[in-house]
Image (cartoon, rainbow, N blue to C red):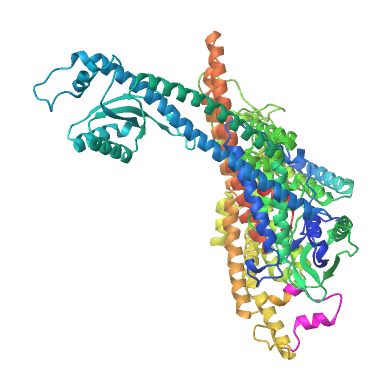
Amino acid sequence: MGDEYPTLFRSEQMSLVQLIVPTEVAHDTIAELGELGNVQFKDLNPNVNPFQRSFVGEIRRIDEMARRVRFFASQIEKEKEPIPIRPLYDSAPLVTVGPRAAQTIDELDVKLAEHEARLTQMNESYQLLSERLRELVEARHVLRETAVFFEQAATRETEVRNSLDDSSAPLLQHDDREQQYSSGELQFDLEFVAGTIDRARLSTFERVLWRVLRGNLYMNYIDIQEPFVDPATGAETRKNVFIIFAHGDILLGKIRKVAESMGATIYPIDVNADKRADSMREVTGRLEDLQIVLYNTGASRRTELTTIGESLASWQDVVAKEKLIYETLNLLNYDVRRKTLLAEGWCPTRDIPQIQLALRHATEESGTNVPPILHELRTNRTPPTFHRTSKFTEGFQTIMDAYGIATYQEVNPGLFAVITFPFLFAVMFGDIGHGFIIFFAALSMILFERKLGKADLGEIFGTFFFGRYIILLMGVFSIYTGFLYNDIFSKSLHLFHSGWDFPEQHGNETVVGASNGHTYPFGIDPAWHGAENGLLFTNSYKMKMSIVLGVIHMTFAVCLQVPNHIRFKRYSDIYTNFIPQMIFLQSIFGYLVICIIYKWTVDWSKASTQPPSLLNMLIGMVLSPGQVEPETQLYPGQSTVQIILLLLAGVCVPWLLITKPYLQYQEMKRVQGQGYIGLGADDAPRLTDDTTLEGEEEGNGRAIAEANDEEHEQHDFSEVVVHQVIHTIEFCLGCVSHTASYLRLWALSLAHAQLSEVLWNMTLANVLGMPGLVGIVALVIVGVLWLVLTISILCVMEGLSAFLHALRLHWVEANSKHYEAGGYQFVPLSFARLNEKQ
Amino acid sequence: MSSSLPAVYVLVLAILAGSGGWVATPKGPNQTLVRTSILLTLACCYLMWMVTYLAQVHPLERPRLSVVE
């Protein structure tokens, strides 16, 4: 396969590179590499506290800017009418590299601070004005309602009773006498307290007052119709206006204190009607002014937010990028002698020219003459695993990576999953109609890829969108398996001549089909559809198919071990692991598959023996080897063959258990015999350490980070033995259980077909024969119901179920045969991923 | 009389198609992916078709209809 291009077959070759970056160019270099997205930086200062790192100050400043940007975003979100935020791809980019970079950031900082100050000030004044507005509205209510009281009181003068006891004379009467001396203006000598209080507290207020003043008060209150809305929280409160008449300063004082403690607001009301009218006019006038001011403040706030909205997306982007750049800069090591920064990181070997180009570009942008230097280092650390995926293969690789990241340069199961996963899904889902539905769903997602990719899709739909290519292939294969199962929405197609002829039926008797010697060439014969014993045939067929497909899939997975053994130069593993495993698998289950196929090719109507049960045959082969009755034999000589196969399988078990540990033991003995001592944790400290050695040689020095941590590969003998025992048991028991596990292919396809048939029988089957207008209406209604249930239950629910089981088959049954999954993911510094995270 | 030989003929066809696909794939970053996909698709589709065909060549059961539609 092409050597020039990287393939998905194994992960790409990675190299450890060291960058020597002059300090002036550092920021721009990292920015350029972030745009490229090809380098994963290692932390060269692992022992340094985050607060002591070199670029902490810059990060703090960027954090402050980020906080401001977040504040703006939340303010814009809170607005009732949405304010447009210009999307990132539409905004002019802010250039943060090059000689003017520092200036740009400073300007941005100042601008953000200004906007924030203005916005907070506007918010505060708006708050204040709203408070004032509320008070004025309350005052107006109070004025209005108390006017009613006073008018009522005036008309009631005449009804006031006289009392013998002066002290208990009604308060109003006292006024009445006063009035006779006045010129006709209504004058009250009464003192009163007027104000507003929460409706809920009113009864408590009244009771407390009654107790405190011992009944020496007259209180009246009225509801305020409109509720007051608190602008900050939006909560509605209902208030009442009250007016309390009492006599004497002490009493009034007590009333005021109680009122304040109960949260009522007191308003000064004048006794005189004219003065009250003046107050009313004044309040109304102030109210109008205040509303105008409030409106203007709101409008200017909106303008401010709209201006902010224009550039908000680009600010967010710049701030996030700068933060990432400085965090990365913190990972670099400052080399005192050369006065440069040292960076170490992993990158794909193939991309090194690209990276060098980017470095040169960064130097040109910043205008200095000293380019950063890149050179590769030799190392024995394991590089991260990187599979170069396209938008098509990304989904498949992700679902296989979810099981585990492949070890560096091991065979990647994701490559094969591109076809085997949708195929196994389709075996469980097979229906032409349902396949079409999911195919078209995926196709529409793909056609609108660019638009949907930019929109925020939410978690559920976003997951479906991410796997659109998987769903597309699943649909295509489902259509194919639907043709093979001859199932379209639980009906079957008669594309070719059937292989069965049915004689005339008289009455209600059962009719048995007669074979006419023709085999239906593509798929299951439609004669089986609706037959009484249809399930008998399809179950047997699907079960056997599951076993055949399963054994072949597992064989393929075992074979994938071989490229791994060759690449990692473990040639002995081929004949200590691979060959015994293969022989074990094939001698029992491969033999079963061959028997299944052979049994199908024999014409049992002309054979001398009855068709034997394959299940009993297999059980008999293991439990009572060598005893095959001539009446139940599949082919002559069967007992001998079966004994040989059983012996082969029996030999493989100790072969697997013993050979590899034995070879390791021999190797160990040989090494010890030659006088070498193993390197381990207990080796003596070296005479010269790495840093001084590195100083002595210029150029290809040793990696700094390597000196800090060592990898121990203990070739402990006992560990190898234990590992091999576990591996053998897992494989041998796994063979049996995994083969049976593939029967889920049969189980799910049966369930799918049955559900589909039940749905049809319970909905459309009842309605298709109905005559007339009623029939048409019923057809439409039931048809819609059928469609909705088909999509929701049969496509979505069954689809998810089949997806899960197909995935399980890949993860457990197939991957356990070859996949080591001991690697770690390559996570390059990439600004594109920033947007993904957001 | 129906025979199992068509399974062999189609196998030969599938192998030919696979070899043709292998040779005809243009060089490029996706060559491995396309080749693997073509071979795997042919293998899976052939297998399933073969199993379906062979299961019906010498059937052990005959369909019984109880009610005429």
Q: Residue furthest top?
A: A772
> Can residue A87 be seen in the rendering of this structure?
yes
Residue A719 horizontal/vertical position (percent): 61, 76
* Residue A100 relative to residue A278: left or right: right
Instruction: Please identify the quadrant where the N terminus of chain A is shown.
Output: bottom right
Quarter of the figure with residue A515: top right
Residue A667 horizontal/vertical position (percent): 71, 82
In the rendered image, the vertical position of residue A814 relative to residue A470, given as above or below: below
**Residue visible at 66% across and 51% down in the picture:** A65
Residue A202 horizontal/vertical position (percent): 29, 32
In the rendered image, the vertical position of residue A262 relative to residue A196, given as above or below: below
Q: Nearer the viewer, residue A329 or A228?
A: A228
In the rendered image, the vertical position of residue B54 relative to residue A773, given as above or below: below
Q: Residue furthest right?
A: A369
Q: Nearer the viewer, residue A799 or A298?
A: A298
**Residue visible at 44% across and 31% down in the picture:** A135
Quarter of the figure with residue A606: top right
In the image, residue B36 lies in the stretch drawn in magenta: no
**Residue visible at 17% across and 23% down in the picture:** A170
Quarter of the figure with residue A210: top left
Q: How many marks?
A: 0
In the image, residue A704 lies in the stretch drawn in magenta: yes
Residues shaded magenta: A687-705
Residue A300 horizontal/vertical position (percent): 63, 33
